[in-house]
Image (spheres, grey):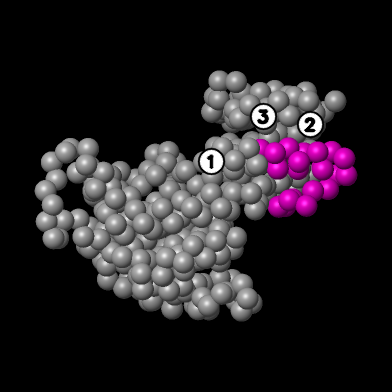
Amino acid sequence: MKKILVTRKLLQPNEERLKQLYEVELNSNDELYSQSKLIEMSQGCDGILSALTDKLDEETINKLPESIKILSNFAVGFGNIDLVAAKKRNIVVTNTPDVLTDATAEIGILLILGACRRVSEGIQGAKASNWKWSADYLIGKQLTGTRLGILGMGRIGKKISKIAKSLGMIIHYHNRSQLSPDQEEGAKYHKDLKSLLSVSDVLSICCPASKETVNLINKDALEHLPKGAIVTNVARGDIVDDEALIDALDRRKIYAVGLDVYKGEPNLNPGYLKHKSAFILPHLGSATKKTRIAMANLATDNLEEFFKTSKCKNKVN
C-alpha cells in the first residue's frame, strides 16, 4: 500500500477516504510544517498531498526522499512549488482546477460590492451603534453601468463576468488571447493591459501568479486607471505592488480596494489597515464546505490516477 503525507488537516470525509486508499500520515493538529519538518515527515512516503502554505522550493524538493513521486497540491494554484526542481527530480505536480471556480468567483463579487459600497466603514458604524442617517452618509459607488475590467478571463474571470453582467456592469477584459464570441458574451477584449486599465472603473484581478505577473499592477499600471477607480484581487498577492497600491489610496487616486490575497500571507502590509476604504478578507476564496471537500477529493483523485497509470490529467509540470 502506498504511503501519503498529508501536510494539513482536511475535512473528515476527505481524511476517511484517504485512509481507505492509502497508509496516511495525517496532521491532526493542523501544524504548519517547517521545511525541515516536512522533509522529516516525508521519509518513507510515496507522495505528498500538499497545501499552498507548504514552501516546496528547490532546496526542499532536492532534500525529499527518492520515494516521493508526486506532489498533489490541494489548490488550483501551485506557486508554492518549484516546478522546475520537481521535474528535475521526476516528481509529478498536480493541482485542483475547476472545482473552486464558483466559490472563488463569489468572493470576487463580494470584494467588488464591499469596496464599492464602503462595507468596512458600514460594519464599523453598525458595531459602534453611533451612526446618524443623512442623505450623504456612506455614499458609495453603484455597480449598475459601471465598467468592470477583468484581468485574466479564465474560469474564475468568466464566472465573475457573468455575475457582474447580471448586476448591470459593463465588462472589459485583458487576456493572453481573445476568447471566442460565445465565451465573451458581449465583453470587450483589450489586447493591451494599459488599454484595459484606462476603462476600468473597477479592476478585478483574476490572472495566475507567474514570473511574468509579479508586480504587474505597479505604480505605472495604477496611473492608467481612472481617478477614483477600485482595485480588487481574488488571484494572488504577488501580482500587486503593495506599496504602490497603498500610495494610490493615500493620494485618493484609488477610491477603495477589495482584497482576499496578499504577499507574505497572513502578514499583510500594515498600510492597508489604516485605510477605512480597504475591504479585506483572510483568503476566503474557496472557503465553502462543498468546495473544500471537492478540492481534497480531486487531490485524492490525482493521486489515484497517477499511481494507477503514472499519468495525471491535472499535471502542471
User: In the image, residue 55 lies at what x, y percent?
Assistant: 58, 38
Please tell me which residue is depicted at 63% across the width and 26% down the height of the picture. Answer: 12
- Looking at the image, which is closer to me, 38 or 76? 76
- Report, in whole angstroms, how far the alpha carbon at label 2 lies from the one at label 1: 30 Å
Task: Name the residue rendered at 66%, 38% in the picture.
Answer: 296
What amino acid is at disc 1? Thr
> Which numbered disc flags the more N-terminal residue, 2 or 1?
2
Q: Which residue is mark 3?
A: 13
Q: Residue at x 57, y 74 (%)?
A: 184
Residue 110, x across and y down, in percent: 41, 53
Highlighted range, magenta = 296-317
Alpha carbon separation for disc pair 1 and 3? 14 Å
Q: Residues within 10 Å of mark 3 (few under 14, many from 20)?
A: few
Q: Are marks 2 and 3 in contact (CB under 8 Å)?
A: no
Which quadrant of the figure contains the N terminus?
top right
Label the magenta part by its dominant secondary structure: helix
